[in-house]
Amino acid sequence: MLPFQRAFFRKLGGDAPLRAMFDALGLAFSVKDAKSRVVLASRPILEKFGLTEAQIVGTTDRDRYPARLAEVFLKSDAKQKLTLAQVVQFKATAIIGKSDYRQPTNWEQTAFAAGAAEVEVDTVTGTVKVTRFVAGHDVGKAFNPFSLRQQVEGGVVMAMGAVFTEELLIDKATGLPLNPNMLDYRPQSIKDAVLAEVVIVEKPKAYGTFGGHGMGEPPMGPPAPAVVNAVYNAVGVWVTEMPLTREKLLAALKASN
């Protein structure tokens, strides 16, 4: 078996398969800031192999450079070689890397959004109806404004379900769900929820493709606080536990009198 001190990585496929190396080493790999995070975390490990940072910076293309392409061979005799996976598996103890990583101070990868709601509240029945909802999102760069608006509209529909109707009920005796189907869980449909008016703010970011920012879950954030604040503004009571049911609102109105 090859001694660790005398081995180093062979560059295959035209470049060092960075991701393959760390997959075989069992290290966590983050696509975000991949080089800086992985290089820092792996430095003490790579020192065991006699590697420097410059020798490992390469491609992160996992499909083109799978782990099986990483080889280790003796400097004195290149014919004596093993796969990186074989070398790591021979190690009796865990190979652990540790580092502290500080995000660059010139940018912050945060989603910025705001929501405004207009509501009608029936103080007799406790019914709340959202008559208008405006969703503003800083997206960095809108590559497909039509698709982006649909993403926000759909997110608001989902969020309104969480605000008004959706609640997972658990049997305290058994721990089993009492409403394990869509009918009893009661998500809202497009007929139930208000169609959001979408405001797109484009402020290109220092990170991401062409300054774009992800828009997966941000539309789910603003609706609940916006509706709760609108209800308070209308009737002067707070209901801060979702879903905002008629029973909760009536109880809050009764307690305020």
Image (cartoon, rainbow, N blue to C red):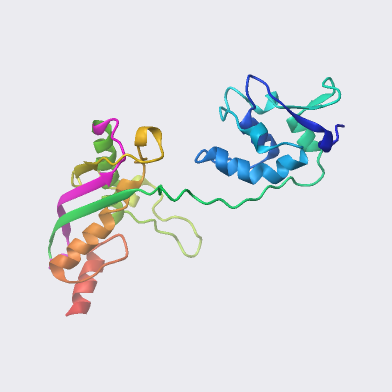
Residue at 23% x, 41% y is 200
Residue 241, percent from left and from top = 32, 65
User: In the displayed structure, does residue 132 sit left or right of residue 204?
Assistant: left
Please check the rendered image and state whether residue 124 is part of the magenta-colored stretch, yes or no. yes
- Tell me the quarter of the image containing the C terminus: bottom left
Q: Residue at x 60, y 41 (%)?
A: 38
Q: Nearer the viewer, residue 11 or 242?
A: 11
Say how many tags the image has. Answer: 0
Q: Is residue 137 visible?
A: yes
- Mark yes or no: residue 28 visible: no
Q: Among all residues in the image, which is located at the extreme bottom?
A: 257
> Residue 143 magenta-drawn?
yes
Q: Can you give x and y, in whole percent of width and height, for residue 51 in the image?
A: 72, 36
Question: What residue sits 65% from the left and 27% below the top?
Answer: 16
Q: Quarter of the image holding residue 227?
A: bottom left
Q: Quadrant of residue 250?
A: bottom left
Residue 32 at x, y = what percent? Answer: 49, 40
Most foreground residue, 207 or 198: 207
Q: Residue at x 30, y 46 (%)?
A: 219
Query: Eyeballing the image, is 105 above or below 143?
Result: below
Q: Relative to the observer, which residue lies in front, 209 or 181? A: 209
Region in magenta? 123-145
The quarter of the rendered structure image containing the N terminus is top right
Q: Position of residue 101 (x, y in %)?
A: 56, 50
Q: Is residue 28 left or right of residue 160?
A: right
- Which sits in the foreground, 81 or 47? 47
